[in-house]
Image: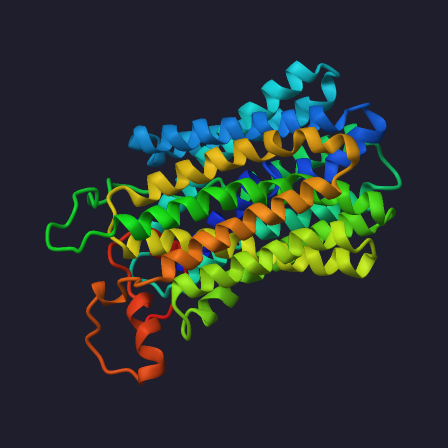
Amino acid sequence: MSTPSSPWTHVARAAAALAAGMGVGRFVYTPILPLMHTQAGLSAGTGADLATANYVGYLVGALAGILLPSLVRSRAVLRGSLLALTATLAAMPVTHSTAMWAVLRLLAGVASALVFVVAASSLLHHLRGHPAHLPGWAIGGVGAGIALSGLLLLALRSVADWRVAWWASAALTALLTVGAWSLRPETAAAASSGKPDSTAPRTHRWFGALLVSYSLEGIGYIVAGTFLVAAIGQGSPGWVGNGSWVLVGLAAAASPTLWARLGRRWSRPALLLAALVVQAVGIALPALIGSAAAALVSAVLFGGTFLGISMLALATGAHLRFPRSVALLTAGYSVGQILGPLTVAPLLHHGYQRALLTAALVVLAAAAAAAVLRIGFPHHMVVVRHTAPPRQRESSEEARPAEAGPDALAPHSAN
């Protein structure tokens, strides 16, 4: 019988899977998009359509993982999805057909989602009982993948064209796939938490506000996640566009630890509101100020919040004990990502500034919904069995999950 591997080994393998599936496989389109505009004749509207195809694929993959739990526990699904993702990236330069590009990006979206659900469920299962910061480091693999893809495009910017960029991204994904190959998926079905607790208070109004907020975040964040590099490149040509994407990745990789520390002092609804406001400012900056400094600050603010917002939203849904909260929130977020590029597509004829400002306003609307969530929020739902100073008691109550599950992906105070 083999000895169980170190939890850090599991973290590294999951981080490699998420870096391949999300950081590169899904988001490398962002720094390659400007090259496709200038070298492959891709219009701004078609660029938005290709992004939408990828997000539709992601929704399909996420729903498949929800409806067919056996997929989540399959090593073959994980490996097959990583290989399929690598193949779709490598195939992008083989054609100039926008219809084929759309099909390839849709398939990449399906594969990315399956990689995510397998890796996430693996973290929940195998790191249960370990310190809460370990899954946070694994989730930071998404940011590491974004940073690696940004560095790759920086290195290739002056010596290669858009075709080489896609092939290099496929090679990077293949390398990360090697690191993720031995990741152990969840080995048994998790205990069902879908039955409502008859003794729990009704939380529909808070969950409704959370669902609205998170769905709006899906719309606003994905516009920046798709067009930020192209928008910055218009106002600050040269290295700034790809350099900003590297900063997005580095900030995203570090953000789980930051939000874990902040969660020791403030409640999740308060942090969710703050993160959404900060993100709205970050998205609007390149549209309002055309300097390189503004672009880099924007990258840090955006990268430092989008993973944090996801973890805070999922953890809050778990705290509210709302049935199938993760599935509902993920569906709302995914639908928002599909609507985002479609919403701003008519604005792209005038450049990316209006699209970014629209996205910032949508994220502010998400912040308004999060502010409603704070009104009378039921912090009392979880009984705290220790005495904490008055100032810390509220955040300590929220820090304890109301049900097993997504909180393992959202670092929080264990004390």
Please indicate whether residue 401 sits to the left or right of residue 136 in the image: left
Residue located 69% across and 17% down the image:
98
Q: Nearer the viewer, residue 111 or 244?
A: 244
Q: Nearer the viewer, residue 70 or 272?
A: 272
Residue 279 in percent (x, y) is at 59, 56
Please indicate whether residue 128 sits to the left or right of residue 61 in the image: left
Q: Which colour scheme is used?
A: rainbow
Please indicate whether residue 70 sits to the left or right of residue 333 in the image: left
Q: How many labels does the image show?
A: 0
The correct choice, above or below, for 187 with respect to 277 in the image is above
Residue 73 in percent (x, y) is at 33, 36
The correct choice, above or below, for 95 with respect to 80 in the image is above
The correct choice, above or below, for 16 with respect to 415 in the image is above
Q: Can residue 185 be seen in this view?
A: no
Please indicate whether residue 266 sits to the left or right of residue 336 in the image: left
Residue 345 in percent (x, y) is at 67, 30
Q: Residue furthest bottom?
A: 389
Residue 91 in percent (x, y) is at 67, 22
Residue located 64% across and 26% down the image:
50
Q: Quadrant of residue 173?
A: top right
Q: Quarter of the image for the C terminus: give it.
A: bottom left
Q: Can residue 168 be seen in this view?
A: yes
Residue located 77% across and 30% down the image:
349
